[in-house]
Amino acid sequence: MSSAIRRGAASAAVLAAVLGGAAAPASAHDQLVSSDPRDGQNIPPTHRDFVLTYSDKIQTFGSEIVVEDGSGKRTTVDAKISRDQVRVHMPKDLPPGQGSIRWRVVSSDGHPVDGIITFNVVDPTKSQSASAAPPSGNVKAKTETQPYNETPSVNWPLFVIGTTAVAAGIFGSIIGYRLRKKKD
């Protein structure tokens, strides 16, 4: 094997290793760090927005938010994603009772995370004791780390650049080899 081919192959291998390492940084999946209102909090029937805050930026694709009201009715609602926050616009006039928000978002590393936030719809005009202070505590969010089949966690721009660079290195090595062989 000529030295031109060896140099080209070595350059391509080094470039692939460098770009391959940059394409898959190690990181933990993002987590829900808070919600407003908090998990288990009492809200009035006219409450409009929930804000979910995560540990890092959330992807703007692949999210699904389902609100289940006190009567058991489930509604998929629109969510506005802005960096690390998801604003959930609630359905109008929620009936009294315990409800939940089932959320699924795609974290900054491309993996889905999901969980449930519960709330209690209480009509303050009907019961004074029902509007007592909400229980304190952390957000109870279950986090799943299963692969997200719809959108792979590949940094496509780096993958395309790396593949192109490796192909160019191999192509350049072949051309260089043929040109040197012609001279000999």
Image: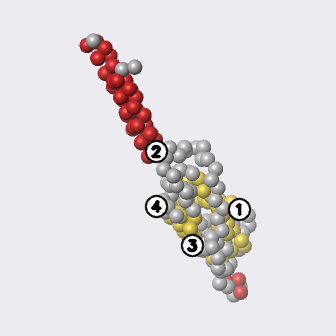
Indicate the colouring scheme: secondary structure
CA gap between label 4 and label 2 equals 25 Å
Residue type marked 1: Lys
Disc with the residue nearer the chain's start (4 vs 2): 2
Disc with the residue nearer the chain's start (2 vs 3): 2
**Residue 92's spot in the image, x, y percent?**
61, 68
Instruction: Determine the secondary structure under disc 1.
Output: loop
Residue type marked 3: Asp
CA gap between label 3 and label 1 equals 22 Å
CA gap between label 2 and label 3 equals 38 Å
**Residue 156's spot in the image, x, y percent?**
45, 42
Which of the labelled discs sits on residue 21, or is there none?
2
Q: Is residue 133 left or right of residue 7?
A: right
Instruction: Determine the secondary structure under disc 2.
Output: helix
Residue 38 seen by the camera: yes
- At 60% across and 43% down in the image, what residue appears? 149
Disc 1 target residue = 73
Report which quarter residue 71 is drawn in: bottom right
Find the residue positioned furthest to the bottom. 128
Disc 4 target residue = 83
Instruction: Determine the secondary structure under disc 3.
Output: strand
Looking at the image, is 13 positioned above or below residue 155?
above
Task: Single out the mark in the foreground, 1 or 2.
Answer: 2
**Cβ atoms under marks 4 and 3 closer than 8 Å:** no
Q: Is residue 117 left or right of residue 21?
A: right
Q: Crowding at label 2, few (<14), some or many (≥20) Cα neighbours within 10 Å? A: few
Which of the labelled discs sits on residue 36, or is there none?
3
